[in-house]
Image: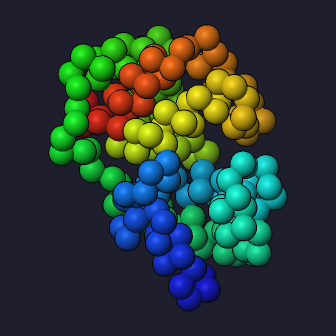
Amino acid sequence: MKEGLLAVCLACHGASGVSETPLTPSLGAQPAFYVVAQLFLFRGGRRDNEVMTAQAKDLKDEDLRSLSDAIAKLPPPPPPKEGRDAERFERGRKATEGRHCTSCHGADWSGNKNVPRVANQREDYLFKALKDYRTGKRIGYGNAQMPETVAGMDDKVLGDIAHYLAHFRGK
């Protein structure tokens, strides 16, 4: 990997991969294949984010692989120490039941291959991503699972799901 390339990523996504920047996801412990796919989509302009598209446009395939491997080795973000609302958390937990969310994201929400880790992700980022899937602004990597999963959910339900996942503490 080119020297300093990971540091460029962590400048926005947090020194240890835990973001403190609004609407910017934490990268720590994201599955390597998922990261490669995202960087590929940004590089090709298929994900809608001017900053990320600009950052990824000159990355070589070897850069994508080495960055994704480095990011996958970062520690996962911890659950927030405060801000958990018990009622919203429970509503969010219930909203994920029966939707087969854990069959892709895992029972501990740590992701798998081309599916992101969502446990302890930034709540604002999760909420935006869920809304973007619902409206079709964010693509589902050639399948319709995420758009279908969130179809018909209003912002309150999506907000409760984002709250639940952001504050998840394990099974």
Q: Which residue corresponds to the image point at 64% horizontal and 33% vertical from the top-left?
A: 132
Closest to the observer: 133 or 170?
A: 133
Visual colour scheme? rainbow
User: Residue at left 54%, top 76%?
Assistant: 8
**Within the image, what quadrant is residue 136 found in?**
top right
Q: Is residue 30 visible?
A: no
**Is residue 59 among the parts visible in the rendering?**
yes
- Of residues 59 and 49, the one drawn nearer to the viewer in this rendering: 49
Rendering quarter of residue 120: top left
The vertical placement of 68 against 115, above or below, is: below
Q: List the single residue furthest toward the bottom.
A: 3
104 shown above or below 49? above
Percent position (x, y) of residue 20?
37, 57
Give me the residue at 57% from left, 64% from top: 68
Lateral position of residue 138 relative to residue 111, left or right: right
- Quarter that holds the N terminus: bottom right
> Looking at the image, how many numbered discs can be counted on the residues?
0
Which quarter of the figure has residue 161?
Answer: top left
Give coordinates of residue 6: x percent, y percent: 52, 76
Vertical side of 130 occupied by 41: above or below: below
Q: Which residue lies at the image location 69% right of the left edge and 26% below the top edge?
A: 135
Residue 3: image location, x then y, percent: 56, 88
Q: Quadrant of the C terminus?
A: top left
